[in-house]
Amino acid sequence: MIPELGNFLLIMAFINAIFLGVLSFVGAHYEHQGLMRFTKRSAISIFLLILASFICLTVSFINNDFSVAYVANHSNSQLPIYYRISAVWGAHEGSLLLWVLILAGWMAAVAVFSKALPKPLVSRVLGVMGFIAVGFIAFTLFTSNPFERVLPFIPIDGADLNPLLQDFGLIVHPPMLYMGYVGFAVVFAFAIAGLLEGELDNQWARWSRPWTTVAWIFLSLGIALGSWWAYYELGWGGWWFWDPVENASFMPWLAGTALIHSLAATEKRGVFKSWTVLLAILTFSLSLLGTFLVRSGVLTSVHSFANDPVRGRFILVFLGIVVGASLLIFAIQSSKIRSKSNFGIFSREAALLFNNALLAVVTFMVLLGTLHPLIQEAFTGGKSSVGPPYFNLMFSIFMIPILILMPIGQQINWKQEPIKPLLTKYWIWALGSILLGFAIVMMMGEVAPMAFVGTALGLWVAAGCAKYILGQTSKSDSFSSGLKKISLSYWGMIVAHLGVAITVLGVVLTSYYSVEKNIKIHQGETVQVEDLNVEFYDFNNLEGPNYISSAGSFRIYMDGKLLADLHPEKRKYHASSMVMTEADINAGLFRDIYVVMGEPLDDGAWAVSVHYKAFVRWIWLGALVMALGGLLAVSDKRYRQRKRERKNAKKNGADKNTANSDSLGADSE
Amino acid sequence: MKHFFAALMLAISFQVMAVIETYEFETEAQEQLYTEIIHELRCPKCQNQTIAESNAGLSEDLRYIVYQKVSAGEEKRDILAYMQQRYGDFVLYDPPVKPSNYFLWFAPIFVFIIILIAVLARVGRRKVTPDSSDDTEEL
C-alpha cells in the first residue's frame, strides 16, 4: 500500500509541476495576482508531495518490503537501520527521486525566500524550474520508477546494498553533491527569466548571487566528501582520478566558480552581462550533461548505451531541449542586454575576465578529455583513453596563471589602476613565497621543480590573503577595528581564496612527498618502511553484523616513538560475498599513516600496504575553508538589508539613496 | 569517488580489494619506475581502472610483465610501446600525441589564445573615460 501511495504522490507532483510550468508564465505575462500566488503555493506543494513520496520509499526500506523491486535489489534484512535509510539513494531509481526532491526543495526555497523580488520574475523563475521538474519527474516515473513491485514472486530477502556504499560517505555525499548540482538550476532559472523579461540589471545579478554561492558551497562539499570517501574506503590511497563521473561533478563546479566571479562584476559594475547569463546557462547544462553521463551508461561503453537506450535517450533529448531552448532564448534576447564596459587592462574587471577565460578553458579541457574517448569510439570504433597524465598536465598549465593572478586580482581597483606602483607593493610577498616555498620543499626531501613551483604558488595565494588583511587594517586606528571594517562578503572572498591556497599546498605536497610501500610481514615481525617501523603485533578473526573480517593490528614507530596503532580489516560480506579491504588511517594535520591488509601469502606472512601521506588532509581542509568562505559571503547582511530597503523604498515612494548604502558593503569576488 | 559512482550509478559490482603485491627490486629507481608505469596503464577489461588498482587476472599478468621488463632494465617508453602494440591506445592513460589526438592536445591552448587575443584587442585598445559620478561610489 505504501509504495502505491508513494507512486501516487509522485504522479500528483508531476501533474502539479505541469500546471506550475504553464500557469506561472501566463500569470507573469498578465501579472495576474491569483496565478502568481498559485505559482508559489504550487512550488511548495510539489516539494511536500515529493517529500511525502520519498518518505514512502524510505518506509518501504525500513520495513524491508522486498515486494518492491528496488528495495529487493538494494537492501537486505541484515542491513543496519541507518544503511537501510541511506540505501534509498543507493542506486539509480532512488537517487533520481532524491534529485527530484532536491530540485523541488530549491523551488520551495525560491518561493519562500524571494518575497522582496518582483512577483512576475519569481513566477517565471519558478516556471522554468517547474519545467525542469516535469522532465525529471517524468524520467523517474516512466523509465526508473522506484516503486515498481515484483509480484507475485516476492523475494525472501534482499540482494543487499553494495558493501562499498555501506558507509558514512554514502549517507552524506550524494545529498550534498545533488544539492550543488541541482542548485545551479536556480541561477539558470533566474537567467532564463531575466532573458524573457529582457531586463538583466545589477539587481538581477544581486538576486542570483546568493543562490549561486549556496549551490557552489554544497557542490564543493559534495566533491570533497566524495574524494575523501574514495581515499579512506577504497584502500588505494588516491583521492582523485579524473574519472568521467568525477569530471561530471567537477565541470559544473569550475563553471560555477567562473559564474560566481562574473556575477560579482555584473552586479558591481554592470559588465559582462551577456557572458554571465550564458555562463549561468552553461553551468546548469553541464550539471545536466553530468547527469546524462552517469545515468545513461554511456560511460561503460558507447555500445552498451546503444543496447539499452531508453534512459540515456530520455536524458539526452531532455538535455537537448533545455540547452537548445535556452540558447535560442539567449540568441533572441541577448541583443537587449546592454553592458557598460568602461575599464582598462589593469583593472579588477580585466582580472575577473582573465579568471573567467582561464576557468572556461579549464572547463572546456575537462569536457574535451571526458568526451574525447566517447566521440572517438562513436565515430571510428577505436577505443582510447584519456587519464590522469593528460588532465594533470593540462590542468596545471591553466591553473598556474590563475594562481599567479589571484592575489593581484583580488586587490586591484575597479576600472583602472596604474600597474607599476601596484606591483611594487607585491614583490616582497612574492619573494617571501618563493623563499619559504623553497625552504618547505627542502625540508620535505627531494627538490622537484614542479613541487617547488606548486608550493610557492600556494604560499603566494595565501600571502595575497594576508596582504589584503594587512592592507585593510593599516588604514584603521587599530588592527582589530580594521578587521571589523572588512565586510563579510570580503571576508568570504579572502577565506575562499585561502581555501584554494590550502588545497593547492595539499595537492602538491601529497603528490610529491608521499611514500607508498607494499611489504611482506609476519605476525610479531617489525619491518622498516623509509623512516617508519611497522610492527605487526596481533591478528584476529572478527564477526560483524553482515560480514566476517580478518583484522590485523599494527604499531607504527618513528625514531622509537609510537605514532599510531592501526587495525585494518579485510571483510567478506555474506549476502553479496564481496570482499572489501577496510584501511585504517591515523590522520594528522601534516601527515596520514594509512595501512591496508592485502593477501595472506604462502608462508603465513601477510602482504600489507603502508602509506605515508604528507599533507593529504589539506586537500579537503581547503575545500572546507572554501565552503566557509562561500558561507561568509552569503551571510553578508546586504542581501537581507535589501529586502528591508525595498520595503521602505516602497513605502516612501522612490528612494534614490538606497544605492549608496551598500557601496561600502562591498564588492566581493 | 569513481568507484562510488560506479557502484552507485552504474550498478556495477566489483571486488574492492586493494592490490598489494610485494615485488622486490634491485634499486629504488626501478621500483619507482614500476609504480609509475602501472599507474599509467589502463586495465583492458575493467571499468576505468589502472592495472595498479585492478584485481583482474589480466592486470595481475600485466603487472608481472611490467615487473619483469623493469627488472631487465627496459625503458619506460619501450614498455609502454609494448603494451600499446598488444592492447591498442586503450591501455594508455597518457594519450599519445598523434594526428587523431591533436584536437585533444591542442584545442584547449588554441581556444585560450583566441580568447586572450579577443580580450586584449577589445580591452587594451579602449580608452577609459574619467569617472562619472555613479562609478566613484563603487570603488
Image (spheres, coloured by chain):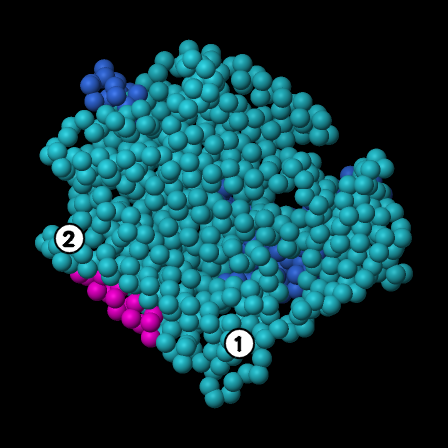
Examine the rendered structure and indicate whether residue B133 appears above or below residue A13: above
Q: State the image coordinates of residue A395 (x, y, percent, origin top left).
A: 51, 38
What chain is tagged by disc 1?
A: A
Q: Are marks 2 and 1 in contact (CB under 8 Å)?
A: no
| Whether residue B82 is visible | no
Q: Residue at left 86%, top 57%?
A: A605
**Which of the 4 image quadrants contains residue A436?**
top right
Q: What span is in magenta?
A: A8-28
Q: Residues within 10 Å of mark 2 (few under 14, many from 20)?
A: many
Task: State the residue position of label 1.
Answer: A64
Residue A411 on the magenta segment? no
In front here: A582 or A514? A582
Residue at x 49% of width, y 29% of height? A403
Q: Quadrant of residue A163?
A: bottom right
> CA–CA distance between discs 2 and 1?
46 Å
Residue A28 circle label? 2
At mark 2, the secondary structure is helix
In the image, is A114 to the left or to the right of A418? Answer: left
* x and y, in percent, of residue B103 in the image: 46, 44
Relative to A42, say whether B24 is above or below: above
Tell me which amino acid carries mark 1.
Asn
Q: Which mark is residue A314?
A: none
Chain that appears blue:
B
